[in-house]
Image (cartoon, helix red, strand yellow):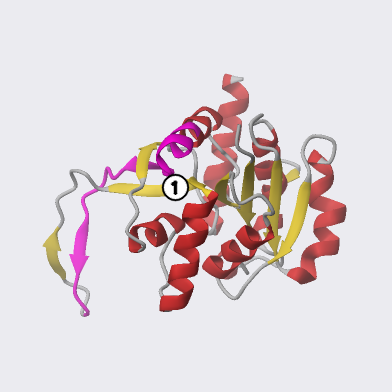
């Protein structure tokens, strides 16, 4: 089986969270958000290594406070983040030493990783090259003009919201990132870079619980999800 790595990106400043520390280090029921994300990936048995991309200034903090939660489960290599998310992912990809493998790219502030769906995405990427998680849009979508007025209503059928993990054959996603870098192209996610490079990306249903925690209200929702999961468990 091809080697499988995870690149977990947690380089954001968290300005929208309005907190004194970076959002990925905020505590969610006694455990940091980033530690919860690592723990979730450690439960996906096919993943052999994690490349954790954080600000270089945070290496010591992560070594002491974040990584120990999975130290005996899966190897973690710290990688310095870049000027934006795309650059941070590129740094993580560049740190991987086995280009024949598969890589799952994930946002560090999505702690509720759906394991079954991620494993399905890994299997599909192994066959087809690229597969990401997402959920269908349920709200009515509007195009807004520069003055704040509705310009048009979009057809909702076939519109999905992309999530992570996004899983790729390593050579495919590295080539897409190299191409984007040479073009000066910036995408909104890694799948868009593969699209820009002419590739096709399969999307499968992820989870409505797989939220990205970026604002104070997201933390409230995350606590509700955690309580719900504990009650179900």
Q: Which of 127 and 58 is in front in this view?
A: 127
Name the quadrant of the C terminus: top right
Q: Nearer the viewer, residue 199 or 202?
A: 199
On the image, numbered disc 1 is attached to which residue?
A: 163
Q: In this view, does 71 lie above or below 193?
A: above
Q: Residues within 10 Å of mark 1 (few under 14, many from 20)?
A: many
Percent x, y of residue 28: 68, 45
Between 193 and 27, the one lying in front of the other is: 193
Relative to 121, 161 lies left or right: left
Tell me the SS state at disc 1: strand
Specify whether 143 is left or right of 39.
left
For the N terminus, the image quarter is top right
What residue span does the magenta drawing correspond to?
A: 123-146
Q: Residue 94's x, y, as percent?
A: 64, 62
Residue at (58, 61) in percent of width and height? 89
Q: From the viewer's perspective, is residue 46 above or below residue 219? A: above
Which x, y percent locates residue 13?
A: 63, 69
**The stretch drawn in magenta includes residue 62:** no
Q: Can residue 38 be seen in this view?
A: yes
Above-or-below relation of 130 to 20: above
């Amino acid at each position: 089986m091809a080697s499988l790595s995870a690149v977990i990106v947690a380089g954001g400043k968290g300005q929208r969270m309005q907190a004194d520390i970076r959002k990925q280090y905020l505590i969610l029921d006694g455990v940091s958000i980033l530690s919860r994300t690592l723990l979730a990936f450690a439960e996906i048995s096919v993943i052999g290594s994690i490349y954790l991309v954080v600000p270089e200034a945070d290496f010591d903090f992560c070594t002491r406070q974040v990584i120990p939660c999975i130290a005996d489960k899966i190897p973690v290599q710290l990688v310095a983040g870049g000027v934006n998310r795309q650059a941070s992912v590129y740094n993580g990809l560049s740190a991987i030493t086995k280009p024949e493998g598969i890589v799952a790219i994930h946002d560090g502030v999505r702690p509720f990783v759906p394991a079954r769906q991620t494993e399905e995405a890994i299997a599909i990427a192994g066959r087809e090259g690229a597969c990401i998680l997402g959920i269908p849009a349920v709200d009515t979508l509007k195009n807004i003009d520069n003055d704040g007025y509705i310009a048009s209503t979009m057809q909702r059928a076939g519109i999905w919201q992309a999530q992570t993990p996004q899983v790729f054959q390593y050579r495919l996603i590295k080539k897409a990132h190299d191409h984007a870098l040479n073009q000066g192209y910036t995408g909104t996610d890694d799948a868009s870079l593969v699209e820009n490079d002419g590739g096709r990306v399969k999307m499968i249903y992820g989870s409505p619980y797989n939220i990205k925690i970026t604002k104070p209200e997201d933390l409230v929702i995350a606590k509700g999800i955690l309580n719900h999961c504990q009650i179900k468990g």
